[in-house]
Amino acid sequence: MFDRLRSRIAPALLTAAGIALVVAGLLTYTAPTDADAQPSDPIAFATPTPPTAAPSLITFPPVPSGSATPSVGPSPTPVNRVATRVVVPALDIDLPVVKPPAGFPYCNVAMYLAIFSQPGLPGATYLFAHARTGMFLPLLTHKENDVMIGMTVWVYTSDDQVFLYKIFRVRSGYPADASLGDLKVKDGELWLQTSEGPKNSSTKLQVVAKFLTSHGVAHADAHPKAHPVDCG
């Protein structure tokens, strides 16, 4: 009996042990392969390219509809630029601007003083007109109570530009015989003058505005027909 059992059990045990060894061998082989396997050819990773910076946006001042579009990029300021038109919308003032005569000032237009500067150039711009209907009379009639403070003034120029200013000061009683060269003016200021009386010796009213912005306009808007009248 003992010999019979031994002849059956021994082969079974050997078979079981062999299977266990085979299984153990597979686990020992496959497990490191999954963890340590290296590709036969290395994978090349591209170096990330830094993103290109977005181009700066050049912002231009607003251009009203129907007016000329300004060209891209700064353009040199013409030294022969002169004021050609002055508008104060809130006071219904809209006058061509011309060079003054040697004698008594014209009527029906405003004039610029050449001893001062022109819009957009270093210095201040000085425009004047009579205190008469259709001219600078509204400056005189609205000088009280600072009602003009904050109003905008538009000055057009010979190179098809318009310069916007904001009134911040009203000066009354400037002596007629005082030298305008003694005025303390600043770059970018606009001065408007009219008379406070009917005589040459009458004191002067001065309205001072500061520059806000500028942009291109249609040629016709900057070149109104001027009809100066010798009213001296």
Image: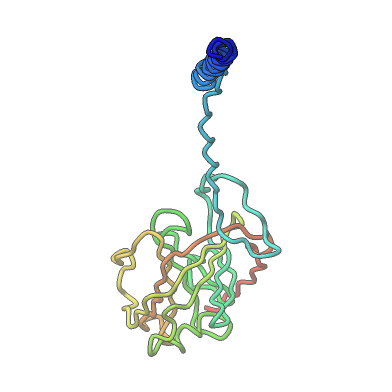
Position in image of residue 4 (x %, y %): 58, 12
Picture residue at 39% right of the left edge, 80% below the top: 205
- Above or below, 17 against 71 in this view is above
* Residue 116 in view here: yes
Q: Name the residue nearer the viewer: 49 or 33.
A: 33
Q: Look at the image and name its color scheme.
A: rainbow
In the picture, measured across the screen, residue 64 lies left or right of residue 20, that is right
Position in image of residue 163 (x %, y %): 52, 63
Q: Name the residue nearer the viewer: 127 or 164.
A: 164
Q: Name the residue nearer the viewer: 26 or 12.
A: 12
* Residue 41 in view here: no
Picture residue at 53% right of the left edge, 15% below the top: 17
Q: Quadrant of the N terminus?
A: top right
List the single residue furthest toward the front: 1
Q: Name the residue nearer the viewer: 220 or 232.
A: 220
Position in image of residue 15 (x %, y %): 58, 13
Position in image of residue 128 (x %, y %): 47, 72
List the single residue furthest toward the right: 66
User: Which quadrant of the view contains residue 207?
Assistant: bottom left
- Above or below, 179 against 195 in this view is above
